[in-house]
Image: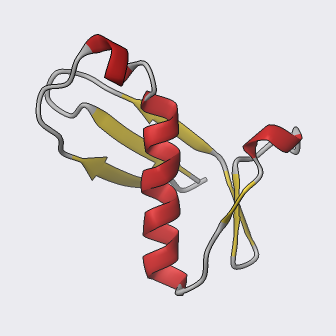
């Protein structure tokens, strides 16, 4: 199993902003896929299909994490 790691560097954010880390990771991966494929990926995270994004025949599960050095790290497979 291979993972693609995308790091997103942001200035220090408040705790209320960091509460949305997963959604920030989703936006980051969707932007990456849009640039990679030239088409708009589809967010299917609310449809209960076991993954978060459909893009160019790929089914992508996104995990968002943060720490002091990298406030948002998107990990997807």
Report the side of 11 relative to 63 (left or right).
left
Report the side of 7 relative to 42 (left or right).
left
Res 21 → quadrant: top left
Above or below, 7 against 73 in this view is below
**Looking at this view, is 74 or 42 the one in front?**
42
Name the residue: 35% across, 54% down: 6
Name the residue: 43% across, 79% down: 35
Res 54 → quadrant: bottom right
Percent across and percent down for residue 77 are: 59, 54
Report the side of 40 relative to 18 (left or right).
right
Percent across and percent down for residue 55 are: 68, 71
Colouring:
secondary structure
Name the residue: 26% across, 48% down: 8
Name the residue: 47% across, 80% down: 36
Above or below, 75 against 38 in this view is above
Percent across and percent down for residue 30 are: 52, 61
Res 56 → quadrant: bottom right
The residue lying furthest to the bottom in this view is 38
Report the side of 28 relative to 23 (left or right).
left
């Amino acid at each position: 199993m291979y993972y693609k790691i995308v790091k997103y560097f942001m200035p220090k954010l408040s705790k209320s902003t960091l509460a949305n880390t997963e959604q920030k990771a989703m936006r980051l991966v969707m932007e990456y896929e849009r640039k990679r494929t030239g088409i708009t990926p589809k967010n299917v995270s609310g449809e209960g299909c076991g993954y978060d994004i459909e893009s160019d025949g790929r089914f992508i599960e996104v995990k968002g994490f943060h720490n002091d050095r990298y406030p948002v790290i998107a990990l997807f497979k």
